[in-house]
Image: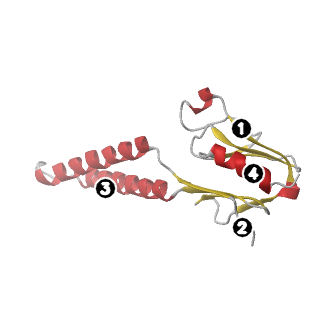
Amino acid sequence: MAKHKFKEEKRFRHRAFYVLLGLIILGASYRLVEQFVLAPVVSWGMVAAFTGMIMVSALIIYLLSSVRFVTVVSKKGIKYQLYPLHFKRQKVKWDDIEEYKVVELPRKDAWSGWNLYYSSDFNNYGFGEHKGLFVKLKNGENIYLGIEHEAELKKNIKKLARN
């Protein structure tokens, strides 16, 4: 097994989503308690709606907290996994790579923090990083992997890549 020289694991950390969903849970919980304590007659439709909001919000929080992105660069190639979308690590061998670059995207692309692109020119994986690894494959596919530790990647990728 090839000893990797660069490995990075990130989790979804956009706190605004967690805060928003937490506020939805608090508001729905308040309205649910209000139905049982203050309302003269319990509206079971409202109870079902607020219970559903709480359960869906809690499920979304759970799913977002389980998302993680792993990037490994080794002598064999590049592996990446955006769990839970990829159940297995995606592997790209050095022989399949036409070109690779450690790039920095324009700051305006990172303003929203989401790295959203409305184009099908490449597959973008990451959580809003404006620095990353751009890989062009021999089959024409382009991949962008968001990286936080750009200097470490630059230092190690030249040693690992077979050109």
Measure the C-alpha gap from mark 2 to mark 3: 49 Å
Residue under label 2, please give it: 3
Question: Comparing marks 3 and 4, which lies closer to the viewer?
Answer: 4
> Which mark, by number, is residue 157?
4
Q: How is the image coloured?
A: secondary structure
Measure the C-alpha gap from mark 4 to mark 2: 13 Å
Residue under label 3, please give it: 51
Question: Comparing marks 3 and 1, which lies closer to the viewer?
Answer: 1
- In the image, what residue type sits under mark 2? Lys
Query: Residue 126: x, y in percent?
Result: 61, 47
Compared to 11, does 115 lie above or below?
above
First in sequence: mark 3 vs mark 4: 3
Residue under label 1, please give it: 103
First in sequence: mark 1 vs mark 2: 2
- In the image, what residue type sits under mark 3? Thr
First in sequence: mark 3 vs mark 1: 3
Question: Mark 1 falls on what kind of element?
Answer: strand
First in sequence: mark 4 vs mark 2: 2
Question: Mark 2 falls on what kind of element?
Answer: loop
Query: In the shown orientation, is residue 77 left or right of residue 9?
Result: right
Neighbour class for label 3 at 10 Å: few (<14), some, many (≥20)?
Answer: some
Which residue is pictured at 25% across the width and 51% down the height? 29
Measure the C-alpha gap from mark 3 to mark 4: 50 Å
> Mark 4–mark 1 contact, CB under 8 Å?
no
Query: Residue 39: x, y in percent?
Result: 13, 48
- In the image, what residue type sits under mark 1? Val
> Mark 3–mark 1 contact, CB under 8 Å?
no
Question: Mark 4 falls on what kind of element?
Answer: helix
Query: In the shown orientation, is residue 1 left or right of residue 46?
Result: right
> Mark 2–mark 3 contact, CB under 8 Å?
no
Which residue is pictured at 89% across the width and 50% down the height? 138
